[in-house]
Image (tube, helix red, strand yellow):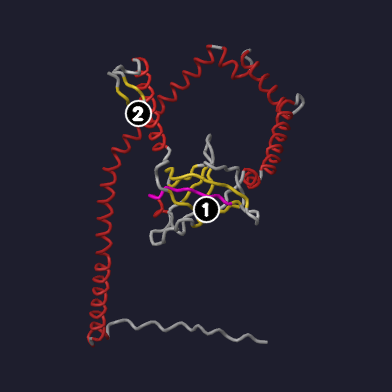
Amino acid sequence: MARSLGGNVYDGHDPYTFRERLAGVAIMVVAALLIVGAVLVGLGRDFFRDYNSYFIVFNDGYGLKPGVKVRFLGLEIGNVKDVRLLDNNKIRMDLLIQSQYASRIKGDSLATVKSPTIIGQEYINVTTGSEDTLPIPNDGQIPAQDSQTIEQLLASLELSRKVKQLEGIIANVTSIMGFLDDRGGPVKSAAENVRIITDRVVAGEGSLGAVLSRDEAYLEIVATLREIREVSASLNATAKSLNADVPDLTGKVDTILRQVETGTRTIPEVARGTREGIRDANKVLDSIKNNFLIRSNLPRPAAPENLTRPLRNG
């Protein structure tokens, strides 16, 4: 018996075929995969994270566009949302930075434009601030510092002056090379003289050539060197013998010097004793002279010679 379902008559038979059911299941699986993929992509691109808004102002746009990365200590923390020109000819850039890093964006943090070393795209770099400085509130301005453009960097390097210096160096090198290549110049003349001398030596001319080309001269030099070595060995042996005898001679000389020193120390005592003996002898002689028995028998002293000279007349 047929039943009515929502105005439709259901006779007990399934209105969908197997293929239709299979197609429905496939569509549901694909839809589920699309939803899961969208969620994963959103998580990978931080679509489901909270962001704080900030802005910075530069004097130059540096060719930056929305989507440029914002980095903090090398870590990507956000991106540039918008870039626009202000009425005062300044460039404002609106930033989106993940809220988890908002407490690290301090009032004395500094935003600059950084360029990659070799390849890559410019990015905004935000420096750390002081620990005792308050964080910048949401929608606040981060202080910015303009970076040097390529033109400014080239101007600071003074490439034109360095190019002129390089041109001067090249001109000097060219002049030196021309001087060296001058056939009539002193360098060529000196080289020619050296060549002539070496040719003569190779040909056996002169003393050096004879030494190099004649075996007799070489043997004579070898014999002379051998004699010199023998004389040197003899001198070394003599020096060693002298070195062996020197300590004995030194000891003998030291002994003699000590004896002489001892003798010189006794000389003043001997002289003192001699003077005392002479003084005692004089006393004895004076006492003998004063004895009346001997004094009468002593010869009278000779009269002193008259040393006066008569005056000249006239």
The N terminus - image quarter? top left
Circle 1 SS class: strand
- Using the rendered view, name the quadrant where residue 239 is placed: top left
Horizontal and vertical percent position of residue 232: 40, 28
Residue displayed at 57% across by 85% down: 310
Residue picked out by circle 2 = 6
Residue picked out by circle 1 = 55
The magenta stretch spans residue 203 = no
Label tally: 2
Horizontal and vertical percent position of residue 58: 58, 52
Circle 2 SS class: loop
Q: Is residue 15 above or below residue 291?
A: above
Start-end of magenta stretch: 92-100
Horizontal and vertical percent position of residue 193: 69, 23
Horizontal and vertical percent position of residue 119: 53, 34
Eye-nearest disc, 2 or 1: 2
Residue displayed at 23% across by 73% down: 277
Q: Is residue 296 left or right of residue 191?
A: left
Q: Name the kind of residue labelled 1 in the image.
A: Phe
Q: Residues within 10 Å of mark 1 (few under 14, many from 20)?
A: many
Q: Nearer the viewer, residue 311 or 113?
A: 113
